[in-house]
Each structure stands twice: as structure tokens, then as C-alpha cells.
Amino acid sequence: MRINCLSCGHKFDLGDAYDDFEGPVKCLCGAMLEIRTEDGRLKAIRLMENISRRPSRGRELGEAAA
Ligand SMILES: [Zn+2]
């Protein structure tokens, strides 16, 4: 099971364990890819947002209910 990173284009081999898999995998470049495979074939691939970089909200104009 080999996939192409959508972020850097690197090809990497996930091995047989991922022939039937749905979930996130991480590339060498640090990008998180969400994939879905079935019978050794790639059904869907999507680049995930970096979850460690969440925008901090909470101080927006007009939202202070004090
Ligand atoms: Zn990559």
C-alpha cells in the first residue's frame, strides 16, 4: 500500500497493515493525511489541518458579556 503525500509529493509505503484502513497517517514532512483504503486500494486521501495549530478565539469584539 503506497500513497503519495499531498503536501510534499513524497511516496511512502504503509505496508500490508494499511490495505484496509481508515484514519490519519503522518508523512515524513509532518503533514497529516487522512486516508481510506479498501482491499489494498486507495479510496480517499485528504490533507488534514495541523491540529496543533488551533486559532485561539475568545477575545472577539462585542463578545464580552460582562
Ligand atoms: Zn509529505
Image (cartoon, rainbow, N blue to C red):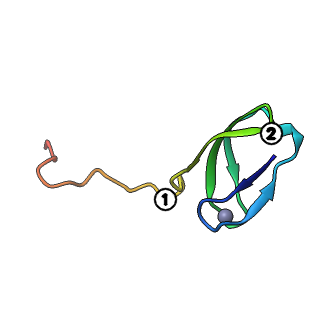
Name the amino acid type tagged 2.
Answer: Tyr
Q: Is residue 47 above or below residue 11?
A: above
Name the amino acid type tagged 1.
Answer: Arg
Q: Which disc, if any, is residue 18?
A: 2
> Which is more toward the observer, 34 or 57?
34
* Residue 9 rendering spot, x and y as whole percentages: 66, 66
- Location of residue 40 (image quadrant): top right
> Which is more toward the observer, 38 or 61?
38
The residue sitting at 74% across, 38% down in the picture is 41
The residue sitting at 31% across, 52% down in the picture is 57
Q: Which quarter shows the C terminus?
A: top left
The residue sitting at 79% across, 58% down in the picture is 12
Circle 1 residue? 53
* Residue 10 rendering spot, x and y as whole percentages: 71, 66
Q: Residue furthest right?
A: 16
**Helix, strand or loop status at disc 2:** helix
**Helix, strand or loop status at disc 1:** loop
